[in-house]
Amino acid sequence: MILHDCRVGREVIAVCAAVLHRPDFAFVGLYCCLEKYRGRGVGKKVWDACMEHIGTRNAGLDAVPGTLELYRDKGGFPIVETRWNCVMNETENPINHEALSDKVPIGVTIEPFQDAFLASMSEYDLALMGYDRKLALRLNCKEADSKTLVAFKDGKCVGFGTIKTSCHKCRQVGPLFADDAAVAEVILKRLIVSLPNVKGFAMMTINSNCPANDFMKKIGCPVTEEYPRLYRKEKIEVDTNKVFAQWDLNFSPH
């Protein structure tokens, strides 16, 4: 949902997104309003439109610093995830990808994305997330200025990751899923190497996934913010030990 001010050339003044992931779950993000329009009910209009779009579904969101109480107490998202937070790791400075291991575990191969891999990747993602994201995976892997690597063992997908050039013109990794931290580390290193001419780096981890956060320390990418997760009705269960980089802050739960 987007609101414009037609008096100033259709300037965007407020935005909110609500993505319907499945019949019983949605994810909310990108909620913002220009400061000069705050307190006028503008932000509430886009919020209410998104809540109407969601209907009676359960929904989740990541609360940026200072907004947890607003969403929990007034926004209709009373359930707070207490086991972990989302962590934004970001820098404009060079990173030390050489500190990451390139040793692939025995029996594992890591290959650039091909259309033929999509079925195996979708099967892996479905087992992890609990619902079908094949279309989103295909669009992610075919996005311009992006690279995706896929790990296989005994003919089955055991992880995959994507790096792309963000709107801030820096490297951004996500998603990065793997059964094994050693596999995730090699994928991460090779993804970074695949975009040699892009400066800066960003990746969103989960604070309970210690190996993922250790990767950030190795390459010298600092934590910039943490975001608690909130839900409308109930928490969703995902094995966060396999989530080394979240797909997106605003549009996807993992």
Image (tube, rainbow, N blue to C red):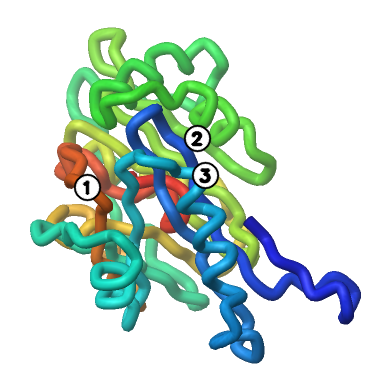
Name the disc covering residue 233, or none. 1
**Closer mark to the observer between disc 2 and disc 1:** 1
In primary-sequence order, the first of circles 2 and 1 is 2
Where does residue 218 sit, x and y in percent of width and height? Answer: 26, 65
Question: What crowding class fits label 1: few (fewer than 14 Cα within 10 Å), some (14-19), or many (20 or more)?
Answer: some
Quick check: 112 left or right of 209?
A: right
Quick check: 89 left or right of 185?
A: right
Quadrant placement of the N terminus: bottom right
**Closer mark to the observer between disc 2 and disc 3:** 3
Quick check: 133 left or right of 75?
A: right
Where does residue 41 sit, x and y in percent of width and height? Answer: 57, 78
**Residue at 55% of width from left, 36% of height from top?**
140
As shown in the figure, which amino acid type bears the numbered disc 1? Lys
**Residue at 51% of width from left, 66% of height from top?**
31
Whole-angstrom CA distance, mark 3 to mark 1, is 16 Å
- Residue 31 vs residue 245, the one in the foreground: 31
- Residue 98 vs residue 132, the one in the foreground: 132
Kindly give the residue lying farthest to the bottom in the view shown: 36
Quadrant placement of the C terminus: top left
Quick check: 233 left or right of 132?
A: left
| Disc 1 element | loop
The residue indicated by pointer 3 is: 53
Whole-angstrom CA distance, mark 2 to mark 3, is 32 Å
As shown in the figure, which amino acid type bears the numbered disc 2? Thr
Whole-angstrom CA distance, mark 2 to mark 1, is 34 Å
As shown in the figure, which amino acid type bears the numbered disc 3? His
| Disc 3 element | helix
Whether residue 56 is visible to the viewer of this picture, yes or no, is yes
In primary-sequence order, the first of circles 2 and 3 is 3
The residue indicated by pointer 2 is: 148
**Residue at 18% of width from left, 45% of height from top?**
234
